[in-house]
Image (spheres, rainbow, N blue to C red):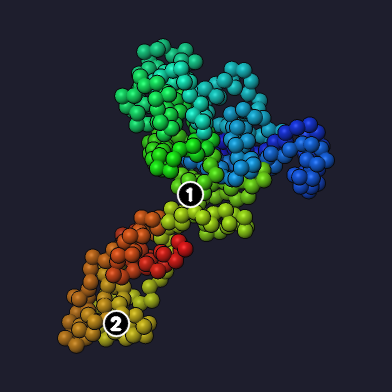
Amino acid sequence: MNENYIAEARNVVKIFGKNKSEAEKMMKKGLGKDEVYKKTGATVALWDINMKIKKKEIFVIIGLSGSGKSTMIRMFNQILKPTSGEIIVEGQNVEKLKGKELRNLRRKKISMVFQNFGLLTHRNVIDNVAYGLEVRGVPKKERLKEAEKFITMVGLEGLGDQQISSLSGGMKQRVGIARALLNSPDVLLMDEPFSALDPLVRKEMQFELLSIQRKLEKTIIFITHDINEAFKLGDRVAIMHDGVVVQSGTPEEMSTNPVNDYVREFIEGADMSMVLKVKNVMFTPLCMVRENVSAANAVREMRENQVSSAYAIAEDMTFLGIITLDNAIKARQEKLPLFSLLTKGIPVTGEEILLKDVMSKAVEAKFPIAVVGDRGKLKGIVSRASVLSSLS
């Protein structure tokens, strides 16, 4: 395995029911899942799944109910075993791990956070969080001290003695995340952990998860059916449908280059401001003027391009400001240096900035925003129209 990847699925197939080998043969011949089920009674849940998860990334698997996403995530800690294919975690074939090695994988390398929290209701918060260390035989004083750190990290400081029954849904999920993180796993599996929460709490938890992941640099494999959640959290995303991976890549890649109509329709409802970047909507300004150009030439350039302003740049393409047509005419008439009448303080942005972070600036700006790169060099411009039209 490439050292940049921590987990990998290789040609994974999962079939439930009898006649698995016969069902697999039929699938290889090109028969559909429904036809295979009618002839064999076997259900093909996953078919030829390939995915690679990078270290320290949030990899989101998204799909509708029945797409196979929850079945897929359970392969990584061997809750489910593939009918064929391999699951590799840190260079090890998970299916070959037995006894102590498998327990070590589940206790130390991979932790899981469930949709229904999976907490021990007869225990308080701190004993739930410390449970994994208790199973590993860590002395009580030491495990409770460690648990307190993670309780604080997930925003539940001072609530260690609270009973689980007294907590809200969001608080319970924080306990579940703290418990999973306490074992210091290399990989955190999260199966629709926020789907039972109300929208406001869900957004809070998404923010908390991003903050914690960036701080601890854990690899997270996250399951969801919500495209906005997938694009908000995912460094990369895999869309599943009917047991297969339809497309995987960054949210930006998927939004700008969907592989087929299914992906295009699936992401249609996504908030594009969370996905698209300035570079996806910027364009070259119609009129630019360099230092030392005459006012007469600047006026002529603007009139030829039918614009009332020009972007002023230095010889090395550094962005300096805006020259308006009125100021260019004034400079020509009064024989003033053209750049003495520059409009400065023009808003600028970078090409890797998300549209959501530049939207208000684009709407309020008098001129299109200058997009600059290294050392302030002009790369393009982004207008209010280009931002808003990309989101429709």
Q: x%, y% of residue 323?
A: 26, 76
Q: Is residue 221 above or below residue 336?
A: above
Which numbered tag is attached to residue 228? 1
Mark 2 or mark 1: name the one nearer the start of the chain.
1
Residue 206 visible in the displayed image: no
Q: Residue at x 31, y 76 (%)?
A: 310
For marks 2 and 1, give the one nearer the viewer.
1
- Disc 2 marks which residue? 298
Residue 49 found in image quarter: top right
Q: Amino acid at mark 2?
A: Ala
Q: Residue at x 45, y 38 (%)?
A: 197
Which numbered tag is attached to residue 114? none
Residue 140 found in image quarter: top left
| Left or right, 374 with reference to 218 | left
| Left or right, 55 with reference to 261 | left
Of residues 279 and 231, the one nearer the viewer is 231
Q: x%, y% of residue 137?
A: 47, 12
Q: Amino acid at mark 1?
A: Asn
Of residues 254 and 279, the one nearer the viewer is 254
Q: Secondary structure at mark 1?
A: helix
> Contact (CB < 8 A) between labels 2 and 1?
no
Q: Residues within 10 Å of mark 1 (few under 14, many from 20)?
A: some
Of residues 375 and 232, the one nearer the viewer is 232
Q: Residues within 10 Å of mark 2 (few under 14, many from 20)?
A: many
Q: x%, y% of residue 283?
A: 42, 69
Q: Quadrant of the N terminus?
A: top right
Q: Give the Cα distance between marks 2 and 1.
A: 46 Å
Q: Residue at x 40, y 17 (%)?
A: 143
Q: Residue at x 75, y 32 (%)?
A: 17
Q: Residue furthest front?
A: 166
